[in-house]
Amino acid sequence: MSVTDDAELSLWKYSDSLGALPDEYDGMSDEERLKRTEAALDELDDVVILGHNYQRHSVTRHADHLGDSLQLSRLAGEADARNVVFCGVTFMAETADIVTDDDQRVVMPSMEASCPMAGMAENIQVDGAWNELTEVVPGEDVTPVTYVNSYASLKAFTAEHGGTCCTSSNASDAFDWALDQGEKVFFTPDKYLGHNTLHELGYGDDDFVIWDPWEDELGGNTPDEVRDATFILWEGFCQVHERFGASDVADVRDAHPDVNVIVHPECRREVVETADYTGSTSTIIEKVENAPEGSKWAIGTEIHLTKRLARQNPDKDVFGLCGEECSDCNAMRQIDPDFLVYVLEEMRDGNIVNRIQVDEDEKRLAEKALDTMLSV
Amino acid sequence: MRTEVLVVGSGIAGCSTAIRAANRGADVTVVTEATSPDDTNTGWAQGGVARRAPDEDAEVFIDDVLEAGGGVGDEDAVERLVREGSRAVDEFLVEEVGVGFDTNGDGFDLVREGGHSTDRILHDGDATGRAVQRALLRRLGESDARVLEGHTAVELVGDRGVDGALVADTDGEAFVVEAGATVLATGGVGDVYGRTTNPEGATGDGVALAALAGAEVSDTEYVQFHPTAHAERGFLLSEALRGEGALLVNEDGKRFMPDRHEDAELAPRDVVATAVHETNRDGQAYLDLSPVFDSTEFAEEFPTAYDNLTDEELESGRVPVAPSEHFLCGGVVVDENGRASVERLYAVGETACTGVHGANRLASTSLLEGLTWGLRAGEHAAENAHEPPAVDRESDAFNGEMPDGFVDAKFDRLQNVMWENAGPVRTEDGLREARAELQRLRGEVKSYARGRLDPELYALRNAVLVGLLIVEAALENEETVGCHRRVGTPAED
């Protein structure tokens, strides 16, 4: 048993993978789980396992590749393997299905690993919002920009309306590009990433409105407010990054005056403003790896990434910006290592379970929005 | 807070449990979301309480219940329901609680509903549940039980077994109630479907909480749809109306039940529900009340229906109807004392699966079941209640804000999926699709609920889980039986 395994990070006591897993997979020892996973993999020569940075160690130790969502999808596309086991959340597996060949099959260990932020922008809501919005401002003046942390259906919507996808590292390029296409940016689904990005481009708090899809009219705005805004930011956020507050930054500075605070741009504006650095997952990793020996780093992102950085950089002091429990991604932790054994053993026996398949039309459009992103 | 017996819910099952346990000397705490008698499923029961008619051979009633249940009910449980339950109606409901059922010159006025082979149902006009609920709450108020209104049990707590619950008030303030025994009596699952005869707030909390605590849940594919709710306004048009002669007709005014079943309008519920559902596919089914107008003093005998109908409907007698989610036959698997498969946890009433209903429930037996098992659970819990252990459970709520209306939007999504795929008629493809959708939704909702002690989010989390339990059971059971109707499978012919 690895001392750094972090399976016990739950806020709640009960394991609640009800019914999703056959009983015989319950209560395996870590040793047995490891043995069975490896045995299944030995017999499977046509499979690649992709592990997201936010996955726990007992999952990632089996991964052929580790990375963020887009890196992993690209690796899936480049891999020759017939079967892709994606240890991440649903929208990532969808993206992998979009970029892989038709004969490649993308499988998730658990179907309940679904990103709540992606779930805050359901297509039916976004379509409704778009119709309402374009009654107030001409559709040709608005360009949708969609964060890759979204369902394939939303990416397809983006392509349909001439927009582009973006990641947390190229959001400002995407915004620039969109403003070349028209006057306004309609950004979904992460309001904090949108807010931080517009500040990065020199815009301010007078330049945007928040579109709350659960409000009755115009996302809670007046027609003039919408007309005056350059950015329309969807009311959505990451459950993990939203939890960090400016007080966490102040507290960590009090406790460690010489600390470097680095946070993800999905954090609230107040956190980004008070941090020393802001950057995507790969930026955070790079920054810490290249930091001088003995330096201190408080990381404002998902705890499993923080813990991995701490493990991999023993010469530095690396820790989370707030307690462990507050920055644990619930969706990511649905990928229980027991589930990995289950899908691999089923696969070995010829059964493909939990396959993620994006509708063909949606796939074509979503791919277009992803391609546009690469060209901006 | 510490108590010997914690009861969650205040319908007939919860009240019976609490009153009985308190009368046996236990320290009882009732946690209920309800703030008025109209907030419980019991309060909304229009039919009545079936009980063995005087001089009736118990076997006849037992056979009626088993037959309605598609022959898969538990015979011992049904025997208990009929013999013990009938006694409990007289000794507890009438004598101890003081429910005043309608009488005539010969004693109680007994009526008959679909599936019953004799007149054996006690009623109070057409609002029996209301009368029962009010009397029970009055009696509960006179007992020593502590009642926490407007409170929600959001999680069960305890290590090996259940030792109480984390309880939240409407402001999201939470505290642990440590209990020697915990009884779930939270009623039905109407909000899982949206169109329902249940009052708002029937989110299947007890089933979800028990499942999350590891208790066995079974028979959840058996969801009863009331055949005749108002197609647009959703309220229930009681079976008693058909008992008094109301007819089901299509748009052309032609009766469609005689071709489907020898008992026509009084056929078992699932038969009528399927017929109405199918008639509505390419038209509209109506309940023709004119025969009832002719045979009864309508406004007096059916005051609830009378109040809910428009002048035009009362004039024409034609009321558009559609099936509506009514009752979950399955639930938390319990023994003869209401004990679930997890230590110190009980479930009673609609939340429980006692085996009485099998694959379908006979009209006017739900109150009887809640009463019978409620009293048993109250007795057993009081006898066995011990000092609860101290529970180490910090409330680590983060309570981040969620956009207003968020929960409603997700409920809409759940209800659409359920009605489309797990309603009165089900297919394998539809159920598979529903399962994938609900698993995704469940994953999202778990994240939202985590660390936020908002009772609405917990209700959503519970409803999604119950939806998933229904879909999974419906997928597994390929046979059409009782109120579970699978098409495109061999059993369909």
Image (cartoon, coloured by chain):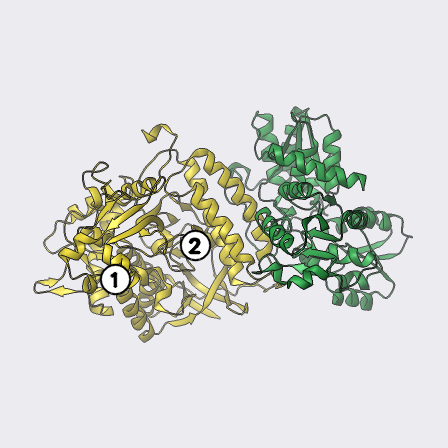
Chain colours: A green, B yellow
Disc number for residue B191:
2
Q: Residue furthest left?
A: B105
Mark 1 element type:
helix
Q: Nearer the viewer, residue B476 or B191?
A: B191
Residue A278 occupies quadrant: bottom right
Q: Which residue is mark 1?
A: B306
Q: Is residue A186 left or right of residue B259?
A: right
Quadrant that contains the C terminus of chain B:
top left
Neighbor class of circle 1 (other Cα within 10 Å; few <14, some 14-19, many 20+) is: some
Q: Nearer the viewer, residue B407 or B109?
A: B407
Cα–Cα gap, marks 1 and 2: 26 Å
Q: Residue B181 at x, y = what percent?
A: 41, 61
Q: Amino acid at mark 2?
A: Asp
> Disc 1 sits on a residue from what chain?
B
Q: Is residue A98 left or right of residue B341?
A: right
Mark 2 element type:
helix
* Residue A87 in view, yes or no: no
Which mark is in front, 1 or 2? 1
Q: Nearer the viewer, residue B201 or B378?
A: B201
Q: Does label 1 or label 2 sit earlier along the sequence?
A: 2
